[in-house]
Image (cartoon, rainbow, N blue to C red):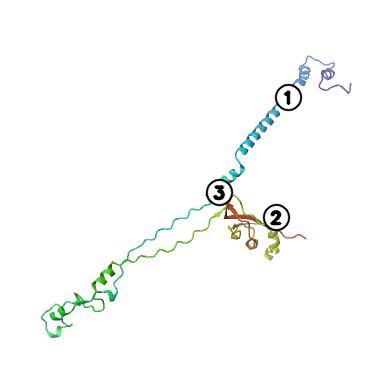
Amino acid sequence: MAKDVDLSSKEWTDIVFDGKNKEYGAYTLRQASVKRHNRAMIAVVVILAVVAALAFLVNTVIEKINEARPTDMIEQEMAAMVAEEAVEEEPEPEQQRVEEQKPEALPEEILNTVKSSEIKIVSDDQVTEEIKSQDDLKNDDRAIGATDFDKGTDDINVVKEHKDEVIVEEKKPEPPKKEEVFTAVEQMPTFPGGEAALMQYLSSHIKYPAAAAENGIQGRVVVQFVVTKNGSVGDVKVVKSKDPELDKEAVRVVKTLPKFNPGRMNGQAVSVWYTIPVNFKLATN
């Protein structure tokens, strides 16, 4: 058998079926196998070419769309949507009801009166109070009433003015509105020196809690805090806890952070929530 015979050629087929019944179906199939293999290979190449062309067209279309719509515009729209969801509607303060109150007249503003006495004929031992004569009543310039009151005023106009007086309750000053804190803005706050400087500050100022170290507790505490519009650290809270002692130390270190470059929205400095992980890892011997 020649070593340079092509295994896919007709000569190889004749060598294999030499002295055998070539009228059997296997010989015919062996002769047609080369064509089938070539057709299959061509089909595979064509399919791969079509897939590659489609992928190229899709990428081209996406790039053109992105070029037509600037990235800054997309980021601004996303930031505006987040900002709208973050705005909390504050209930309008209820208007205080002003009630008109008519105060009771003070003793000095009550009109002086003199009791009108009714004359009845009774025995002397049944008389309980002094009976004023008609002459006394005529000479008295006080008003006549059912009771005798001599501790007020003789000016009836004073009493009328006092009755018409209305006391208006002063409105209490409205409490100042709470400053809005954003979750995402056009320009997020940045730490002086970048993220690497921030992580370096945290690692150099952390004091590993003794109780956690003794118990071999380590891991990551995620802390969220407000970077105010002047760059200082505001409210601080733990959003992912690991251990109470580690949480407490993470909050303490975050509160000592120096001022950030504040976040900005529409060119104005605003307060923004900022999230960082604080890693606690024990040194291995």
Distance, label 3 to label 2, CA atoms, is 27 Å
Quick check: marks 3 and 2 in contact, CB under 8 Å?
no
> For numbered disc 2, what is the local secondary structure?
helix
Q: Which residue, given by chain and number where applicable, does mark 1 sit on?
A: 42
Distance, label 2 to label 1, CA atoms, is 55 Å
Using the image, tell me which numbered label, if any, was put on residue 103.
Answer: none
The outermost residue toward the left is 121
The amino acid on which the numbered mark 3 sits, given as a three-letter code, is Val
Quick check: marks 1 and 3 in contact, CB under 8 Å?
no
Q: Of tags 2 and 1, which is closer to the observer?
A: 2
Q: At x 13% / y 81%, what residue is drawn? A: 135
Using the image, tell me which numbered label, if any, was put on residue 82.
Answer: 3
Q: Earlier in the sequence, mark 2 or mark 1?
A: 1
Quick check: marks 2 and 1 in contact, CB under 8 Å?
no
Q: At x 16% / y 80%, what residue is drawn? A: 139
Q: Earlier in the sequence, mark 3 or mark 2?
A: 3
Residue 56, percent from left and from top: 67, 33
The amino acid on which the numbered mark 2 sits, given as a three-letter code, is Ala
Q: Report crowding for label 1: few under 14, some 14 to 19, many 20 or more residues within 10 A (C-alpha).
A: few
Q: Earlier in the sequence, mark 1 or mark 3?
A: 1
| 112 over 76 or under it: above or below | below
Taking 78 as reference, is 7 left or right? right
The outermost residue toward the bottom is 125
Q: Which residue, given by chain and number where applicable, does mark 2 sit on?
A: 196
> For numbered disc 1, what is the local secondary structure?
helix
Residue 128, percent from left and from top: 17, 83
Work out which quarter of the rendered image holds the N terminus and state it.
top right
Q: Of tags 1 and 3, which is closer to the observer?
A: 3
> For numbered disc 3, what is the local secondary structure?
helix
